[in-house]
């Protein structure tokens, strides 16, 4: 028996033209999954498909701005018309204004954060679930953040919005686990990505310090293993959750954070 049987499973990875989404997507493809990536622009998707080709894997791609209802519906239609969907790895981009303390936020920031981190995963799940239920097979992985469990005030926009993913995943897991659809959450620790560098860079500017200094103090010093996250290990965890061999890991919330969380509850 193989622990990670992904062969031929069609899996959508959202917000995957770079950063965590891309790094997980191409590795899942290398493990045998049939991956569709989505992201806002056609150009960034084209770049991502080319980068993946240079890494030796072929990715399918379809544009979708997670904030737009018609894009979510278009993506679900595309999947239905081109071979269906067995798995969803929901990843989102960053809220434009982040990092921001609550007093720095505006009404539209809350709308954006909610669309990105709550409406998009919930509605996309709603759109893809019927296909999974019809097949009697589906695997959903929501990528969230450790800061949902141990909040950071400057991430208030994203984290209050995506806290609901824990509820969403557990509801899907309990309601549809018996019909072959399993759902889990990964709480991400710190990963070195363009997005993380942008957020930390802005924070450094606000605090009048350097990115390097802040990276050392705010990122590395908080991680017991002393490094940022490895994408290979993260992809293996996601693969296990997506795998045909997984029939029992359902409704779980797993932190992949090098031991950063102090709480024993996640
Ligand atoms: P990134 O900026 O490097 O990559 C984000 C990806 O999302 C890009 O492909 C971008 O094109 C896409 N994207 C942005 N807005 C989008 C939209 N509206 N619709 C569709 N796609 C969109 O960011 P990252 O560091 O890889 O982070 C990805 C997610 O993981 C974010 O939600 C972030 O908050 C979360 N996260 C990251 C870390 C970290 O340390 N990097 C830690 C915890 C959680």
Image (tube, rainbow, N blue to C red):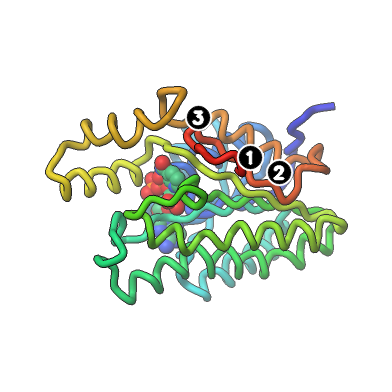
Q: Residues within 10 Å of mark 2 (few under 14, many from 20)?
A: many
Q: In the displayed image of the protein, which residue is found farthest to the top?
A: 225
Q: In the figure, residue 58 lies in which quadrant?
A: top right
- N-term-proximal mark, 2 vs 3: 2
Observer-nearest of 185 and 94: 185
| Secondary structure of residue under mark 2 | helix
Give the CA separation, mark 1 to mark 2: 6 Å
Q: What residue would you read off at disc 1?
A: 238
Which mark lies nearer to you, 2 or 3?
3
For the point 45% across and 40% down, the residue is: 50
- Residue 64 vs 107, above or below: the answer is above
Q: What residue would you read off at disc 3?
A: 258
Q: Residues within 10 Å of mark 3 (few under 14, many from 20)?
A: some
Q: Total marks drawn?
A: 3
- Residue 70 vs 172, above or below: the answer is below
| Secondary structure of residue under mark 3 | loop
Give the CA separation, mark 2 to mark 3: 22 Å
Q: Are marks 1 and 2 in contact (CB under 8 Å)?
A: yes
Q: What residue would you read off at disc 2?
A: 242
Q: In the figure, residue 100 lies in which quadrant?
A: bottom left
Q: Residues within 10 Å of mark 1 (few under 14, many from 20)?
A: many
For the point 57% across and 29% down, the residue is: 233
Which mark lies nearer to you, 1 or 3?
3
Residue 104, image x and y in percent?
A: 24, 65
Screen quadrant of the C terminus? top right
Q: Is residue 180 left or right of residue 9?
A: right
Screen quadrant of the N terminus? top right
């Amino acid at each position: 028996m193989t622990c990670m049987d992904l062969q031929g499973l069609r899996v959508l990875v959202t917000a995957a033209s770079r950063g965590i989404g891309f790094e997980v997507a191409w590795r899942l493809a290398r493990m045998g999954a049939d991956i569709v990536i989505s992201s806002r622009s056609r150009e960034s998707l084209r770049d991502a498909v080319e980068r993946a080709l240079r890494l030796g894997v072929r990715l399918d791609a379809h544009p979708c701005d997670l904030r737009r209802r018609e894009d979510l519906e278009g993506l679900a239609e595309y999947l239905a018309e081109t071979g269906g969907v067995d798995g969803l790895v929901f990843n989102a981009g960053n809220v434009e204004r982040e990092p921001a303390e609550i007093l720095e936020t505006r009404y539209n920031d809350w709308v954006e954060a909610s669309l990105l981190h709550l409406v998009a995963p919930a509605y996309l799940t709603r759109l893809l679930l019927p296909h999974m239920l019809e097949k009697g097979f589906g695997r959903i992985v929501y990528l969230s953040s450790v800061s949902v469990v141990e909040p950071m005030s400057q991430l208030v926009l994203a984290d209050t919005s995506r806290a609901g993913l824990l509820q969403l995943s557990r509801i899907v897991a309990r309601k549809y686990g018996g019909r072959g659809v399993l759902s889990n959450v990964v709480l991400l620790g710190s990963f070195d990505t363009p997005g993380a560098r942008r957020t930390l860079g802005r924070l450094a500017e606000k605090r009048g310090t350097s990115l390097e200094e802040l990276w050392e103090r705010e990122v590395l010093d908080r991680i017991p293993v002393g490094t940022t996250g490895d994408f290979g290990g993260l992809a293996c965890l996601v693969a296990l959750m997506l795998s045909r061999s997984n029939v029992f890991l359902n409704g779980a919330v797993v932190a992949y954070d090098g031991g950063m969380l102090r709480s024993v509850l996640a």
